[in-house]
Image (tube, rainbow, N blue to C red):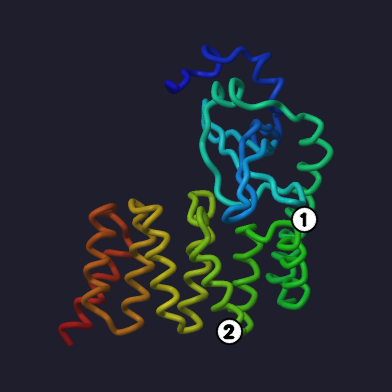
Amino acid sequence: MERAGAVADACPIEEVSRYCMATDLGLECVCSRRATVKVGTGTTVKSQDSTLYYYAKQIDDDLLALQSLNANWAPSGPSQEVTMEELITQYQPEVDMFLKKVKPVMQKIAKHVAKGDRHRNNGEPYSAAMEYNNALTLDEKNVRAMFGLGLTYLQYDQHEKAKVLFEELIGLEGFTAAEYKHLFNQFGIELRKQKMHEQARRYYARAIEQCPTDENLYFNLARAFFEEGRFGDADRTLATCLYLNPVHEEALKFRKYLSSVCLS
């Protein structure tokens, strides 16, 4: 299918309003689609029709991010992009489901995460962990709750728990989406503070795979290399940072300092 044009041209506003509601996050909705799925294994495999439900959130003039709903009616896991035209022609609106099931559970998760953040910032690790875990009970792949719990573990020296959660995070599809960029830096800083250099490097390398033009990720990776004593790798990574942003002030100062260290 060809990409639709602007919403106003391709999709009459009354059609869009059947699907989506204007909220604080922009246009949001729940929609469904009939699909044939395979159940069973081996010789018992059979096909059956099933209705799949999705949460959609507008991310551009004519693009929405589509996420599956889990058993708790929470949007969970990686998202895919669809156009407004694709939404209207290939999916059915589920307005009541959004209002009565999905939106309330999303609000509940957001409240748990917000409470967890407050407890963590106030130096209350046990209360913070409880709130983050409450959120993860509703959505076990909630990135913000996982980040918050990971930061709680790191700040209170629970390194083994932090390592387990780190492995889950780094393997989570979609965890490096642009909306989580501000969490990258915070998590990486805490990893370095705890001398978990290998994890910090892997973390930034994974983030760079998804955001290869973000000069700050290279700067942070260079710091991790430096703290391991890998000055050559640090210098090469800083060169990439400065290639992307030649006036990156901190990188310029860092590279000058690194040169003095290597020459001394």
Q: Position of residue 104 (x, y in %)?
A: 81, 45
Judge the density around disc 2: few (<14), some (14-19), many (≥20) Cα neighbours within 10 Å: few
Q: Residue at x 49, y 76 (%)?
A: 191
92 versus 113 height, above or below: above
User: Mark 2 is on which residue type?
Assistant: Glu
Query: Residue most toward the left?
Result: 263
Q: Quadrant of residue 247?
A: bottom left
**Element carrying mark 1:** helix
The residue that mark 2 highlights is 160
Instruction: Tell me which residue sits at (62%, 41%) in the image.
Output: 47
**Residue ID at (73%, 67%):** 133
Question: Distance of mark 2 from mark 1, alpha carbons?
Answer: 27 Å
Characterize the local packing of mark 1: few (<14), some (14-19) or many (20 or more) Cα atoms within 10 angstroms: some
Judged left or right of residue 70, residue 264 is left
Instruction: Report x, y in % for residue 22.
Output: 70, 29
Rendered location of residue 208, percent (x, y): 37, 58
In the rendered structure, find residue 205 and report the number of the disc placed on it. Answer: none
Residue 214 at what x, y percent from top left?
37, 54
What residue is disc 1 on?
111
Q: Are marks 2 and 1 in contact (CB under 8 Å)?
A: no
Q: Quadrant of the N terminus?
A: top left
Identify which residue, 15 or 132, lies in the foreground.
15
Question: Considering only vertical position in the picture, is 105 above or below 167?
Answer: above
Camera-side mark, 2 or 1: 2
Task: In the displayed orientation, state which residue is furthest to the bottom.
Answer: 264
Residue appearing at x 54%, y 78% in the figure: 163
Numbered circles on residues, count: 2
Q: Amino acid at mark 1?
A: Lys
Left of 111 or right of it: where is 13? left
73 is higher (above) or lower (below) than 172: above
Q: Quadrant of the C terminus?
A: bottom left
Q: Is residue 188 left or right of residue 96?
A: left
